Image: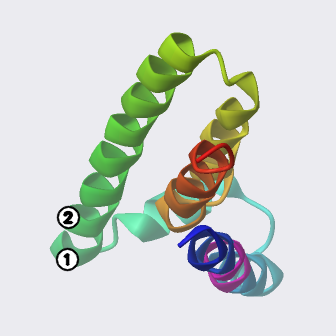
Amino acid sequence: MRNVYLILAIIGAVVPMYYFVSWFEEFGYDLGAMVEAWNVNDASTGLTYDLTIAAIALLVWIIAETTRSKAWLNLIAIPATFCIGVSCGLPLYLYLRTRHA
């Protein structure tokens, strides 16, 4: 399973970043405009909130488990989650937390 998590983390980083970079190339490097685009209609706003809530839940889980286990390297899944997305952060965290299993 560990290799599956790593592959999913890589795919979860590459695929969203491809679209983010494509969007920035077309519309300019304006984060405000990107956030505005995420809320262009009710469907995209719902998806934005869905992913934000999932990211916060993952953040809480990572912090709680890392505090307990003292596996501080696992904290790198937090910037991966908030800079790329849950599609990268979650499988990356699962990969990291299984390294001693």
The residue under the point 72% across, 76% down is 10
The residue indicated by pointer 1 is: 43
The residue under the point 60% across, 64% down is 88
In the image, which residues are magenta?
10-15
Q: Callout 2: few (<14), some (14-19), or many (20+) C-alpha neighbours within 10 Å?
A: few
Position of 67 relative to 84 (above/below): above
Does the stretch in magenta take in 17?
Answer: no
Give yes or no for contact between labels 2 and 1 (Cβ–Cβ under 8 Å): yes
26 sits left or right of 57 in the view: right
| SS assignment for the magenta stretch, majority | helix
Position of 22 relative to 69 (above/below): below
77 sits left or right of 73 in the view: left
Callout 1: SS? helix
User: For the residues marked 2 and 1, what is the alpha-carbon distance in whole angstroms?
Assistant: 5 Å
Q: Amino acid at mark 2?
A: Gly
Position of 43 relative to 59 (above/below): below
List x then y, in percent, for residue 41. 24, 74
The residue indicated by pointer 2 is: 46
Callout 2: SS? helix
Residue nearest the viewer, comparing 88 with 72: 72
